[in-house]
Image: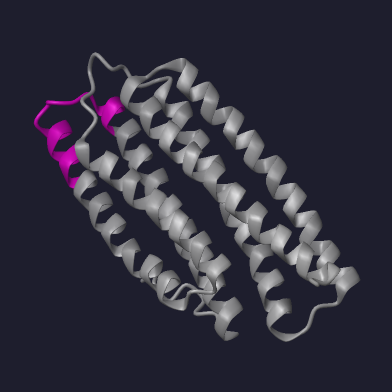
Amino acid sequence: MATRFQRQLNELHVNLITLGSLCEKAITLSAKAIQSQEEELAKQVFETDRDIEKKERELETLCMHLLLHQQPVAGDLREISAALRMLSDMERIGDQAADIADLSLFIDKSKVQIPDIIGRMVDATVEMVTKSIDAFVKSDLDLCRKVINDDDRVDEAFNEVKEMLADMIYSQNMDAKAGLDLLMTAKYIERIGDHAVNIAEWVEYSITGIHRNNEHQK
């Protein structure tokens, strides 16, 4: 029979998956909001961000309870400590999805063509977030390292977006304000990828006891 500690650890895993799903929902909805500029979609992102913040607080309380009352040792202690760090990054993912949704309310769809590459960046970051949470639940070191390596694709796409928008603004094929709004959108997506990497690095720490301290960043 599972101990109380093990049941609560399983509860942590289940709720982290739920929180990860909320993050995926927020990212996906924010991308749709940018593409359609529909106010209702932006409102859904803001609501999802509030759900993320509420779930983050619940899980933070659970982690603190496990640390203070169950007194875990060794691997269990690392796992709970890593989960606390992950919660911070997941909450920031929700915030940045909300920032994208907020931008969608000011982008004039009659003047802006959303580059396809931004959609591909969204798909890549959603996949990274999903895999980073899966890696934690499954203690899968290979999977979390794949997330860390996948960040290069998102960074390359962001650089491509920067060059594309600069060329369009310079050639007067895009209004400067619209170009800056799209650049900020791409930057928020790129930052979401960075948060997914942070999560994966904490997963790696929970498994190995070694934290690479953002070595992927140059």
Residue 180 rendering spot, x and y as whole percentages: 31, 34
The vertical placement of 191 against 65, above or below, is above
Relative placement, left or right, of 13 versus 125 is right
In the depicted structure, whether residue 82 falls above or below residue 168: below
Where residue 23 appears, as percent x and y from the top left, is 53, 44
What secondary structure do most residues of the magenta stretch adopt?
A: helix
Residue 186, visible in the rendered structure: yes
Check the image and name the residue furthest to the top: 110
- Give the image location of residue 7, x and y in percent: 77, 64
Residue drawn at (17%, 32%), measured in percent from left and top? 169
The quarter of the image holding the N terminus is bottom right
Count of labels in the image: 0
- In magenta, the rendered stretch is 163-179
Of 95 and 150, the residue lying toward us: 150
Q: Report the front residue among 81 and 2.
A: 2
Query: Quarter of the image containing the C terminus?
Result: bottom left
| Colouring style | one colour
State whether residue 155 is above or below residue 39.
Answer: below
Q: Would residue 152 be counted in the magenta stretch?
A: no
Q: Is residue 210 visible?
A: no
**What is the residue that sits farthest to the front in this orientation?**
1
Above or below, 38 against 14 in this view is: above
Which x, y percent locates residue 40? Answer: 48, 17
Magenta stretch: residue 172 in it?
yes
Q: Residue at x 56, y 71 (%)?
A: 202
Residue at point 78%, 83% (across, down): 73
Identify the residue shown where x is 83% and y is 72%: 3
Residue placed farthest to the left in the image? Answer: 171
Q: In front here: 208 or 39?
A: 208
